[in-house]
Amino acid sequence: MAAIVLIRSIVRNFKRPATAASAAYSTGGGGGGCTCTSKKLEGKVALITGGASGLGKATASEFLRHGARVVIADLDAETGTKTAKELGSEAEFVRCDVTVEADIAGAVEMTVERYGKLDVMYNNAGIVGPMTPASISQLDMTEFERVMRINVFGVVSGIKHAAKFMIPARSGCILCTSSVAGVTGGLAPHSYTISKFTTPGIVKSAASELCEHGVRINCISPGTVATPLTLSYLQKVFPKVSEEKLRETVKGMGELKGAECEEADVAKAALYLASNDGKYVTGHNLVVDGGMTAFKIAGFPFPSDS
Ligand SMILES: NC(=O)c1ccc[n+]([C@@H]2O[C@H](COP(=O)([O-])OP(=O)(O)OC[C@H]3O[C@@H](n4cnc5c(N)ncnc54)[C@H](O)[C@@H]3O)[C@@H](O)[C@H]2O)c1
């Protein structure tokens, strides 16, 4: 059912061309050309899981622009190494599978050994998982476990190992990526939706303890952005449609006219939460979706004599 609703919504949006305003607004990927006058993460050390691509890469880029040193931890060693090289000498890559606790522990320890501290831990790695079967009555529990292992176990494990260093340091900021699919049901397959609804709960639970130690923890729930994760998902829904057309479709999915959700919007939300700007914000779910999950237009048919 959820997949059917999603497909309906995609098809509806597929017919709706992106407005000229939204097309003109696009700056493409990355951090979106920061003209910052002050560096908000000067001297800070950040570790980003799933940082090789998409939202993690854009956030790494934004953090670097603001003076941080960034360790990218990702399963994909080839892309991760390339990304770190592209981002410059203050970025480095460590291979890490977030489903393996020892890998996360190792990435955190390596960061602390190398730089003497960990200021920001961003648990961002995630997958959508299979889109079929659509019905929960047919749910493949092995696939469900796989999605939960990456999207939930990986996040909890990242929080655990970051907290080991942040609690004694009595400072630090932990971020996690949820999704609009974790705010409203029916936007994505069940396993992904369930995993993303879990993230704000994890954040609130951890915040209740970490507050005592001066450590903040928050999550970000982005709207749809045309990253490799989204494009490969849409390619399964529309196998015959070109990537370019799919990118256009994603641009037309938002509710806020004149803008579209870009990697840079998520990166800037992460910068706000990670920097001193967000110093009194903890246990929060920052939804970056142009209002998509804030309302539902009443779609009832008007009576014929109205
Ligand atoms: N793109 C969107 O529209 C969107 C919207 C809402 C939420 N999100 C969430 O944002 C996060 C990042 O997604 P993205 O869109 O940038 O996707 P992406 O596919 O571009 O990046 C995800 C990264 O995670 C890595 N990864 C996957 N499994 C891993 C594992 N087991 N261990 C370590 N790394 C692993 C991948 O190699 C990849 O580099 C995910 O948690 C996703 O659910 C994305």
Image (cartoon, rainbow, N blue to C red):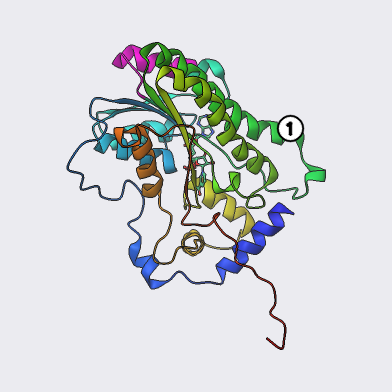
Q: Quadrant of residue 175?
A: top left
Q: Closest to the observer: 143 or 265?
A: 265
Q: How many marks?
A: 1
Residue 203, position in %: x, y? 53, 30
Camera sees residue 53: no
Q: Which residues are magenta?
A: 105-119
Residue 194 vertical placement versus 187 (above, below): above
Residue position for label 1 = 142
Q: Which residue is drawn at the image coordinates 40% and 52% (left, top)? A: 262
Residue 17, horizontal then vertical, whole percent = 49, 72
Image location (x, y in percent) of residue 124 = 48, 34
| Residue at 61% from the left image edge and 58% from the top image edge | 239
Place residue 259 in its image quadrant: bottom left
Depth check, front residue: 275 or 232: 275
Which residue is drawn at the image coordinates 25% and 35% (left, top)? 40
Look at the image and say whether residue 115 sits in the magenta stretch. yes
Residue at the spot x=56%, y=72% of the render?
A: 15
Q: Is residue 300 visible?
A: yes
